[in-house]
Amino acid sequence: MITVILQLICPDRPGLVSLLSGWIASHNGNIRHADHHTDEDAAMFLSRLEWDLEGFTLSRDEIYKKVFELANSIGGKAQLHFSDELPRVAILASKQSHCLIDLLCRVNSQEMKMIVPVVISNHQNLKGVCEQYNVDYRYVPVDQVNKLHSENSILEILKDYKIDLIVLAKYMQILSPDFINKYPNIINIHHSFLPAFKGARPYHRAWKRGVKLIGATAHYVTESLDDGPIIDQTIVHVSHRDEVDDLIRKGRDTERLALARALRFHLRRQIMVYQGRTAIFA
Amino acid sequence: MITVILQLICPDRPGLVSLLSGWIASHNGNIRHADHHTDEDAAMFLSRLEWDLEGFTLSRDEIYKKVFELANSIGGKAQLHFSDELPRVAILASKQSHCLIDLLCRVNSQEMKMIVPVVISNHQNLKGVCEQYNVDYRYVPVDQVNKLHSENSILEILKDYKIDLIVLAKYMQILSPDFINKYPNIINIHHSFLPAFKGARPYHRAWKRGVKLIGATAHYVTESLDDGPIIDQTIVHVSHRDEVDDLIRKGRDTERLALARALRFHLRRQIMVYQGRTAIFA
Amino acid sequence: MITVILQLICPDRPGLVSLLSGWIASHNGNIRHADHHTDEDAAMFLSRLEWDLEGFTLSRDEIYKKVFELANSIGGKAQLHFSDELPRVAILASKQSHCLIDLLCRVNSQEMKMIVPVVISNHQNLKGVCEQYNVDYRYVPVDQVNKLHSENSILEILKDYKIDLIVLAKYMQILSPDFINKYPNIINIHHSFLPAFKGARPYHRAWKRGVKLIGATAHYVTESLDDGPIIDQTIVHVSHRDEVDDLIRKGRDTERLALARALRFHLRRQIMVYQGRTAIFA
Amino acid sequence: MITVILQLICPDRPGLVSLLSGWIASHNGNIRHADHHTDEDAAMFLSRLEWDLEGFTLSRDEIYKKVFELANSIGGKAQLHFSDELPRVAILASKQSHCLIDLLCRVNSQEMKMIVPVVISNHQNLKGVCEQYNVDYRYVPVDQVNKLHSENSILEILKDYKIDLIVLAKYMQILSPDFINKYPNIINIHHSFLPAFKGARPYHRAWKRGVKLIGATAHYVTESLDDGPIIDQTIVHVSHRDEVDDLIRKGRDTERLALARALRFHLRRQIMVYQGRTAIFA
């Protein structure tokens, strides 16, 4: 059953739920999910509406047209999605395979509705994994003298494969602001409980500090490193018996979970981003 | 700021969100929270709408009248609540004080919006606690020969104090079906992760079974003991080093949390009960 | 660095820690880990000692001989293990691949110290996965008329591959008591928070009961189904928005984690089993 | 049953477990708990031994003498404790009562083995609570011009009441290094998941950052604010629906739990502090 998903953010005012649901009802739409949130501090209204395409009296094109008219009329920003349109996702990875394999398994088992046509890596060791899952593998070494050169290669690949979304599955390179501006949809997994242990080697620093819990944070990537909107955070207990290697090992499990949960929220269009934060309608 | 809270359950059909939100908008209502859920299995629609009373063009009496007309017209069942109407709650306890004190503290600090005029117990040791919090304390010993006698005493107290809701805060007596039918709103805390370890001495049985997690379950009380709709469940890790006494001790913390969370959901009218289950709009 | 791991269970009495550690010290052993537990209820002493083989003045054979003499002298039962002896593990699975792939990945990345020479399944769909990981795959369909026939085929395979440990990674068949008696080391993952929802279709029953948490339990297999000693339990939160399919999906993640954690404890010889329960020295 | 608890930290070398347990056995000691940990990075050996005083052939004075001789002989630092010696604890609080009441309840119910003769506060509102629990209450306002003056008043009270341990139960004042040096045993509860949100107003900053989990950290107090050895950390999930006030409310529950757990570890002498970190033998 195909559904239409509308995500809308606009200034708050009375009557918005009625306006939106009324419009859907007037075209014979059967609402599956209706989620709303008012951020009173920001005076913003957030809405996510999902309804059946079947029986709805407007075509896809008409829906697009009308939705953006509606959004404009209330000073809002809308995003529209049809559930049968699977996004094309590029996974960027370095040496570690655990997040990559986890995602490929979830795609394979239909748990995650997306198409992964290509994996890009600055290392060569993940080629075999990609072949197992029939995913193209592209090796783009990092050119230390001219990082721009590597990024341009990646951009070209993204273009070739018509990529909608980038997932950084333990890609241990920092992308330039230029790159990030070109691709607004990038999800990263950071191996700490942000904002604790921003930057490099978080597990080593967590061990040194003697924390009793470690975590992982999945977030959208913005120009300011590790400061993008947080989507999901998971934690795991550690004790004095855990060495740095144990933290890294335990961390792998939380990283996989946080990244998979975040990506699933994204794919189901359950995330609203505003003012550097997310609302998750799940 | 006083709000109106409408909770509605009715057979599912298209247009319900629009119908409800449209009615609120037509009387100038400013919606604060709008939560909906469709249980496709049961073909039921659940809705919780909360809007400002100020500025709404209907009086409380008119709202009552209209809401129940509306509910009838769609074959639904509605509950209406105004946020300034604090329910009168009786807490029933036995010997253990941890849940009772926890609730009284939360009422005291305004974290829980309710009035607790009386505590009823089949033991005498909690009298001092009640005095500290200026709550009446009524001792109703359990008459083993004639349990009905005790229950009648309790019912009279409930009537005297105009009680809306009963909280069983470690009240270790089983209430008769008759009693339960007279009071539809009873919340209990059971000291296990239901449906595991139904019945008596759950911690002893959990210890014997060698489980690695123990839990607590807050639920509405129905005629079938420990089978009422579950509101909240919390867990805590245990190890082989924990004796039964440690399970009981650790359990106290989860019991307090589960009961407090459940009661808060209830007080904020965030719980929808249907078909022996709950939906929590939180 | 190779270590010797001694696990001992015996009746409690004063001087046991001294006796054991004294014996190790007297042969120049450097203890890495020393864990002890006294179950006062059962009057049993449990000990796990791990020390460096290098520098120890006894050979492996002498250690075996002496350890069992020592254990006998105090009425105890000992198990001895050298860290460089990797157990040979057979994984039994049915249709679902998530636990199987998870384990194979962990073996592959050296996170789990074991050898998996063969996977046995009553379905054919996991053959490709096994090939990817260079593991033999053996298809043993369940003979509904004569289950014994299937079990005999499995036993033969286990013998051929010199299997030390069986892991039931979502193997949806019940093994006969006869089979279980022949292989004392079987670890199973049950898809519920035992003892809740023993038996078949636990997610369906959990959904029906309206629980707010679901879980998974890794346990040793004994003759009495789902009643074996519990090794690890994990849980995940669910809400009214989760359908049975969501419980199954969320459950997969907890199943993988519980099974992997339990198996790791086993491989590191951190589990002591006694009186139907486990002590985990982790 | 009175037990002796020995906590020892010394440079690692072979034979230490045997040396310590041998000494206990040689005086007829029955060991209840024996925990050891080797920090290989630091080349340190940590040991906690607990044995029955009854039947042990040395008196308390002789134990003291011998233990410190033993510790000296291996270059270690020992702490000795007898389980019937209840420490005298001063609780410092400001306006908020939740941690204070929680601790007083736990003392009252014998869950926490300590004596709380006095509560010191820079506010007057907690006087009534202290009276309920028959604990002296001393008001020491903070002299903004001369903070030293206030601290001297506190020090005098601590001396008068022969205080062994200070618990900062939401005491919102910073103690001077001088003060801290005079009292090595101070436990504080910080309302964030350290090292995230060190310093003031952590809940406000957590909300602003849009984190999905908030936490609390119980730690020993050292001169460097919020950087002392971490004892326990707890977390709670938050969502976009939670305002700052909800974070504060949810935080209260995690603060109480983390502080109570940490204090219990301390009272049972289960904490070893070394190199700015803790090992918890629990």
Image (spheres, coloured by chain):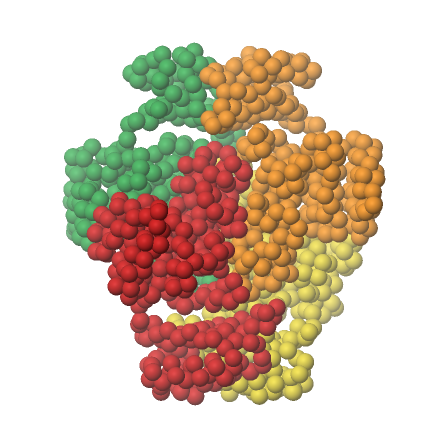
Chain colours: A yellow, B red, C orange, D green
**Lateral position of residue D228 relative to residue C241, left or right:** left
Above or below residue A211? Residue A147 is: below
**Lateral position of residue A114 relative to residue A246, left or right:** right
Above or below residue D90? Residue A115 is: below
State which quadrant residue C180 falls in. top right
Q: Image quadrant for the C terminus of chain C?
A: top right
Residue A198 locus on image (x, y percent): 50, 53
- B270 or A160: which is nearer to us? B270
Residue A63 locus on image (x, y percent): 63, 84
Residue D116 locus on image (x, y percent): 24, 38
Q: Residue drawn at (43%, 18%), measured in percent from left and top?
A: D30
Q: Residue drawn at (24%, 53%), measured in percent from left and top?
A: B137
* Residue furthest out toward the front: B145
* Residue B75 visible at all: yes
* Residue D123 visible at all: no
Residue A26 locus on image (x, y percent): 57, 88
State which quadrant residue D246 falls in. bottom left
Q: Residue drawn at (65%, 25%), measured in percent from left and top?
A: C81
- A131 or C148: which is nearer to us? C148
Q: Residue drawn at (50%, 26%), measured in percent from left and top?
A: C42
- The image shows a total of numbered marks equal to 0
- B153 or B53: which is nearer to us? B153
Q: Image quadrant for the N terminus of chain C?
A: top right
